[in-house]
Amino acid sequence: MLEEARKRAQKEGVEVEFIKVDATKFKREEEFDAAICLCEDAFSLIGSSDDPIEHNLAILKNIYESPKPGGKFILTVLSALSRVKGASNEDIVKGTFDPNAMTFFEEIEAPDGTKFPD
């Protein structure tokens, strides 16, 4: 996907640097004119041992510190409300939805019968 974006930028004559990186660990001395984070649910892409609040704050802090003074910061997110609307008290009781982390849990079974998460 990034290669396609690079090709498109070159075709349009736009000078841009695309970076794919773990946003919780991103550090760079050089500041950017702008930073964009297309989150599309990225805040929920955490490991089972990660603290969701610390994870999300690390991402936001790193993005916030990336632009030059006066630079632009663009962030897209999915509406948490749209996710929560589908949750019920039964989901919370069953443990399939955590309202604090706004996370749904789903068990998936592989063809060999192995269930994830275990």
Image (cartoon, grey):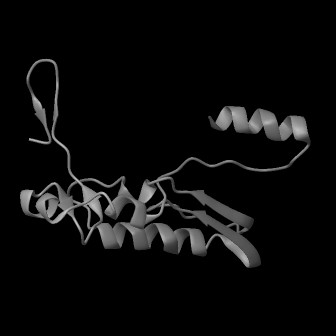
Residue 14 in the image: state x and y as whole percent: 87, 47
Q: Residue at x 40, y 68 (%)?
A: 56
Residue 64, relative to residue 44: is it above or below?
A: below
Residue at the extreme bottom: 69
Residue 36, relative to residue 66: is it above or below?
A: above
Residue 45 in the image: state x and y as whole percent: 36, 52
Image quadrant in which you'd find residue 73: bottom right
Query: Could you tell me how many numbered marks the image carries?
Result: 0
Image quadrant in which you'd find residue 9: top right
Query: Image quadrant for the C terminus?
Result: top left
**Nearest the eye: 103 or 27:** 103
Residue at the extreme right: 13
Residue 83, relative to residue 106: is it above or below?
A: below
47 relative to 30 in the view: left or right:
left
Q: Residue at x 59, y 59 (%)?
A: 37
**Nearest the eye: 19 or 37:** 37
Q: Residue at x 75, y 74 (%)?
A: 71
Residue 49, relative to residue 72: is it above or below?
A: above
84 relative to 62 in the view: left or right:
left
Query: Image quadrant for the N terminus?
Result: top right
